[in-house]
Amino acid sequence: MKKTFFCIDSHTCGCPVRLVAGGAPLLQGASMMERRLHFMEAYDWIRKGLMFEPRGHDMMSGSMLYPPVDPQNDTGVLYIETSGCLPMCGHGTIGTVTIAIEEGLIIPKTPGKLRLETPAGLVLIDYKQVGPKVETVKLTNVRSFLHSEDLLVHCPDLGEIRVDVAYGGNFYGIIDPQENFTDISDFSASQLIHYGKIIRSLLNEKYEFIHPEDPNIHGLSHIQWTGKPTKDNSSGRNAVLVGENALDRSPCGTGTSARMAQWYAKGKLQPGQAFVHESYIGSQFIGKIEETVTVAGKPAIIPSVEGWARITGYNTIIIDDDDPYKEGFQV
Ligand code: PYC
């Protein structure tokens, strides 16, 4: 049997977003987190088939839209990535909103605004539309917080590495410049991926990362290397390990949220101040702390992240049961 998926492809600041506009499965659940768990149990082959080679690649990511559980919201979003079904994805949200508005997949209840149900929680959108084009999308993210500071791991070749862990919709191990890691620019992309994977495994073996309010969100999924920006107006630069073989091409929306939470906790960023984050390829998101709040009694922030996306094409993709690579592969 052949399954057909009608996809609209885009990129957010260089990072791909493939919105599955036709062919997504019906999901059960009283929240996007429950629907995510249903998808992971019954339909993960769709994610693998659409994200991995030969239909996707190491940095592919995507999304599917579902009717909102709460009728006051505009839509539910499921994120599909090479790294699994993330609870939240910032660049994925910016691409998804741009496609959904430009292609008429969602009619907003209030023009210029959307309320998105994501597995990690409610995400609020403000977008600027000029004629048929969405120029920018600002997402106000879930509550983000510094989880732990100065965790130590011994990375073969590099030596001792100090890591802060922060949550911004996913858990990020943030590696700032230090004795054994001087700057992003001193390492090649393949070295950042190689060492990032080792450090991620060591951290997950040694420590537990569980969201205090939702145990379905657990595990350190990404490593965020940080370093000197290359642009005068950037506040910081990052290189985020995604999945097994790629660095995020965008500054990573949930990673930017996590980093703002880390900076806030260290007194380096105040509510209202702009935080311009630069990606590995030089594209930028504008971040801001919108509000200070708490999570399980500890200080947290509500961050916003603004960026842009462009549609790149329409893609009708077939997954044939008879194809030995129907669930894709990674090398
Ligand atoms: O933008 O949040 C993000 C993201 C997560 C993984 C890749 N990009």
Image (cartoon, helix red, strand yellow):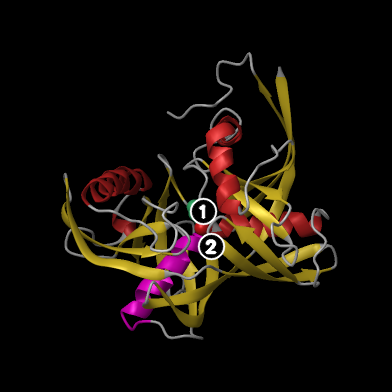
| In magenta segment, residue 86 | no
Q: Which residues are magenta?
A: 252-268
Q: Is residue 214 visible?
A: yes
Q: Residue furthest top?
A: 322
Q: Which mark is residue 283?
A: 2
Residue 288 percent coordinates (x, y): 51, 78
Rate crowding at label 1 as few (under 14), some (14 to 19) or many (20 or more) other CA atoms within 10 Å: many
Q: Are marks 1 and 2 in contact (CB under 8 Å)?
A: no
Between 160 and 168, the one lying in front of the other is 168
Q: Which SS class for mark 1?
A: loop
Which residue lies under the disc numbered 1?
Answer: 87
- Above or below, 39 against 319 in this view is below
Residue type at numbered disc 2: Ser
Q: Which SS class for mark 2?
A: loop
Between 218 and 161, the one lying in front of the other is 218
| Residue at screen point 45% across, 51% down | 216
Q: Which mark is residue 70?
A: none
Residue 201 percent coordinates (x, y): 28, 44
Residue 291 percent coordinates (x, y): 51, 82
- Disc 2 Cβ-to-ligand 1 distance below 8 Å: no
Residue type at numbered disc 1: Pro
Q: Quadrant of residue 185?
A: bottom left
Between 304 and 189, the one lying in front of the other is 304
Rate crowding at label 2 as few (under 14), some (14 to 19) or many (20 or more) other CA atoms within 10 Å: many
Q: Is residue 14 visible?
A: no
| Residue at screen point 57% across, 57% down | 91
On the picture, is 9 further left or further right than 59?
A: right
| Residue at screen point 56% across, 55% down | 119
- SS assignment for the magenta stretch, majority: helix
Q: Quadrant of the N terminus?
A: top right
| Residue at screen point 53% across, 38% down | 40
